Image (cartoon, rainbow, N blue to C red):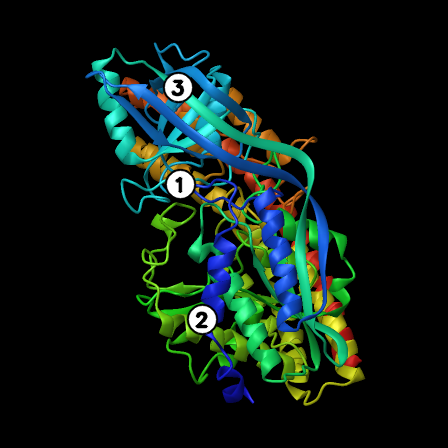
């Protein structure tokens, strides 16, 4: 069956579809197929018709509410010191800016920290800012600082990290804040020339800006849905996003192409699954809601919010976001949850036509749309790999076929691998879940040295593991799909959902982990900082230890107003509904302590007694929160034990 399926995979079809998808552009020079834009709507219409053409059933558009982002053009021209006019294109972050030959003034403010504005008049001017979003901070920090300093707009230069493939690469990311300040990006090459001209022209240049970029709140985009109907009401999901920054060959034209290529091959093979295969192609993944840190995956968030009933029938999910196309990769490593690792690694072995070793990463990511479905109780895997440095071309004009070292052999392998895994999923009577692996990991993540009264939690985890091992035996005993397994699957799905939504949470950097881990890590880093301060090593305390404590690092560089604005957009009462709403509720407020340490370091002080006392008080705050988290986890584990025992008895 599977070998026959692979003979129907047609790379010419997939690549042709990708080329057509890439042709939908808001900006004729740069691309952009973004949230609710005319280009995204047209691309969705095309995919809707193509789904019907290749034979998918129940094809429809499911409209969801998003903030729309449409970027049509942006360029700057200015006179150089030699009298020549220089003109170049800009890419745009999510912002509102309509400019027709508008005269603007531009000044350079280094990294855009509060200290970088000293003795520089920026009111009513555009500020040029260097940034490395991997090693330093996300773009929302310097953009908000510029807004507080009353700048008229921002021009970002990505000098490392993301979007650093070449000096001619333009890049953009989700803005993770409000969109009321124009925010553009220029290449490193143009920035180097511009900075030279600034030196020659007194530190300020008058330029001409043309731009057409807009945000509209509460707009609409479409998620495109189609099915290969099955015989029972359980559903396997195959998902990806069709919106894009620039032309986005890898992220995510490759994923959409692979999804459609797999579906076409399965249909031509005459495949009739036991479970319905539901394809969901989402809009507004890259960005889709204003005024929050968690502004990505909006299309999937709103679709899942619209369909809570999917939790009863969802079986498993495959997410092809940024699919493997690179000939330089060394292995396929799908990302999944701890409970799924053993089962998925078995399923992925010895697949004829897969050219790479197969393995897993865990836990899940919150950077992709898989997480939204996992919250419904649907275990997920998503395409990932090792041996490829994807980040320099990520979300940039360099996300092109040649830059990504495209390989026909590898892309064909991706079709066969995930098409085969989908069919293997379909034949499973129950999900390949092992909750004992989760509890093993949880036990490893309890540091008894930090809080002495962790014994009760450890005992409860061991009890949960004991029950989970019995459940695993039952899980492995099923041999066919019937009414018994359908009932069992619903119950197990509720267990998985409870784990995802309650036992796990996220920290201030969207890392998915057990809910006690943020406080435990904070205590670890605060303790290490105190030890280093006592030994006189303030540099290590500040730059290594305290960097791990929530947003302490950012407080060193951006003023209190900026800090408060961006914290409030996460935990404030007016923070909008997002996929992460309520996942982060407190913060170790380190801004004042960080600034005190900066002052001591700048003065060359060696007496840190007062600041150590403040750090010790913060440790007590974190310990109290940790004790609360432990108590919450014990309560959750008790409920999970009952739910697992119910599955065993039934």
* 398 lies above or below 409: above
Q: Nearer the viewer, residue 77 or 492?
A: 77
Q: Is residue 634 visible?
A: yes
Q: Position of residue 275 (x, y in %)?
A: 70, 78
Gap between marks 1 and 3 measured at Cα: 21 Å
Q: Position of residue 137 (x, y in %)?
A: 42, 36
Mark 2 crowd level (few <14, some 14–19, many ≥20, 10 Å Cα): few
The quadrant the C terminus occupies is bottom right
Quick check: 397 left or right of 519?
A: left
- The disc placed on residue 171 is 1
- The disc placed on residue 12 is 2
Q: Nearer the viewer, mark 2 or mark 1?
A: 2
Q: Position of residue 280 (x, y in %)?
A: 64, 61
Q: Nearer the viewer, residue 351 or 405?
A: 405
Q: Position of residue 476 (x, y in %)?
A: 63, 85
Q: Quadrant of residue 525?
A: top left
- The disc placed on residue 208 is 3
Quick check: 270 left or right of 521?
A: right
Kind of element beneath mark 1: loop
Sequence-first disc among 1 and 3: 1
Q: Are marks 1 and 3 in contact (CB under 8 Å)?
A: no
Kind of element beneath mark 3: strand
Q: Nearer the viewer, residue 197 or 422?
A: 197
Looking at the image, how many numbered discs can be counted on the residues? 3
Q: Residue at x 44, y 19 (%)?
A: 101
Q: Residue at x 52, y 49 (%)?
A: 24
Q: Are marks 2 and 1 in contact (CB under 8 Å)?
A: no
Gap between marks 2 and 3 measured at Cα: 44 Å
Q: Is residue 576 visible?
A: no
């Amino acid at each position: 069956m599977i070998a026959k399926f692979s003979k129907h995979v047609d790379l010419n079809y997939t690549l042709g579809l990708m080329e057509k998808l890439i042709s939908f552009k808001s900006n004729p020079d740069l691309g952009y197929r973004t949230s609710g834009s005319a280009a995204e709507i047209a691309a969705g219409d095309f995919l809707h018709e193509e789904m019907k053409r290749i034979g998918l059933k129940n094809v429809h558009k499911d409209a969801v509410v998003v903030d729309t982002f449409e970027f049509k053009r942006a360029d700057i021209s200015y006179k150089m010191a030699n009298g020549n006019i220089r003109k170049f294109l800009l890419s745009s972050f999510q912002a509102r800016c309509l400019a027709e030959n508008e005269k603007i003034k531009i000044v350079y403010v280094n990294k855009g920290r509060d200290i970088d504005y000293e003795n520089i008049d920026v009111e009513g001017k555009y500020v040029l800012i260097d940034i490395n979003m991997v090693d330093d901070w996300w773009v929302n920090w310097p953009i908000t600082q510029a807004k507080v300093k009353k700048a008229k707009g921002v021009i970002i230069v990505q000098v490392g990290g993301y979007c650093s493939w070449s000096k001619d690469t333009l890049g953009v990311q989700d803005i993770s804040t409000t969109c009321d300040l124009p925010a553009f990006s220029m290449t490193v090459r143009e920035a180097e020339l511009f900075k030279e001209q600034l030196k020659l022209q007194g530190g300020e240049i008058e330029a001409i800006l043309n731009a057409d970029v807009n945000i509209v709140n509460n707009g609409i985009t479409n998620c495109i849905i189609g099915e290969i109907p099955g015989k029972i009401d359980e559903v396997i999901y195959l998902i990806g996003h069709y919106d894009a920054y620039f032309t986005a060959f890898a992220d995510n034209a490759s994923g959409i192409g692979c999804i459609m290529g797999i579906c076409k091959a399965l249909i031509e093979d005459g495949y009739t699954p036991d479970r319905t295969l539901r394809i969901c192609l989402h809009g507004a993944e890259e960005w889709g809601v204003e005024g929050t840190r968690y502004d990505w995956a909006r299309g999937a968030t709103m679709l899942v919010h619209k369909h809570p009933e999917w939790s009863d029938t969802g079986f498993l999910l495959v997410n092809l976001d940024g699919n493997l196309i690179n000939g330089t990769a060394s292995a396929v490593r799908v990302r999944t949850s701890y409970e799924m690792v053993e089962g998925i690694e078995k399923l992925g072995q010895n697949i004829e036509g897969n050219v790479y070793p197969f393995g897993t990463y865990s836990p899940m990511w919150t950077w992709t749309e898989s997480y939204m479905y996992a919250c419904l109780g649907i275990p997920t895997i998503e395409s990932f790999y090792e041996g490829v440095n994807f980040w320099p071309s990520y979300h940039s004009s360099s996300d092109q076929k040649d830059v990504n070292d495209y390989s026909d052999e590898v892309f064909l392998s991706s079709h066969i691998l995930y098409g085969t895994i989908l069919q293997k999923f379909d034949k499973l009577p129950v999900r390949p879940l092992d909750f004992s692996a989760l509890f093993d990991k949880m036990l490893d993540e309890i540091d008894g040295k930090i809080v002495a009264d962790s014994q009760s939690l450890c005992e409860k985890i061991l009890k949960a593991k004991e029950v989970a091992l019995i459940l695993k035996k039952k899980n492995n005993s099923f041999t066919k799909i019937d009414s018994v397994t359908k009932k069992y699957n619903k119950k197990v799905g509720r267990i998985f959902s409870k784990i995802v939504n309650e036992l796990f949470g996220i920290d201030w950097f969207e890392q998915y982990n057990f809910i006690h881990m943020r406080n435990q890590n904070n205590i670890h880093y605060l303790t290490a900082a105190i030890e280093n301060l006592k030994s006189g090593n303030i540099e290590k305390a500040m730059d290594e230890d305290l960097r791990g404590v929530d947003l302490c690092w950012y407080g060193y560089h951006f003023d209190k107003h900026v800090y408060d604005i961006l914290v409030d957009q996460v935990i404030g009462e007016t923070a909008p509904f997002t996929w992460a709403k309520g996942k982060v509720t407190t913060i170790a407020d380190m801004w004042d302590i960080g600034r005190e340490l900066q002052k001591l370091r700048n003065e060359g002080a060696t007496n840190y007694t007062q600041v150590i006392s403040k750090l010790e008080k913060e440790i007590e705050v974190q310990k109290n929160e940790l004790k609360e988290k432990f108590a919450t986890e014990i309560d959750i584990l008790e409920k999970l034990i009952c739910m697992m025992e119910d599955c065993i008895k039934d």
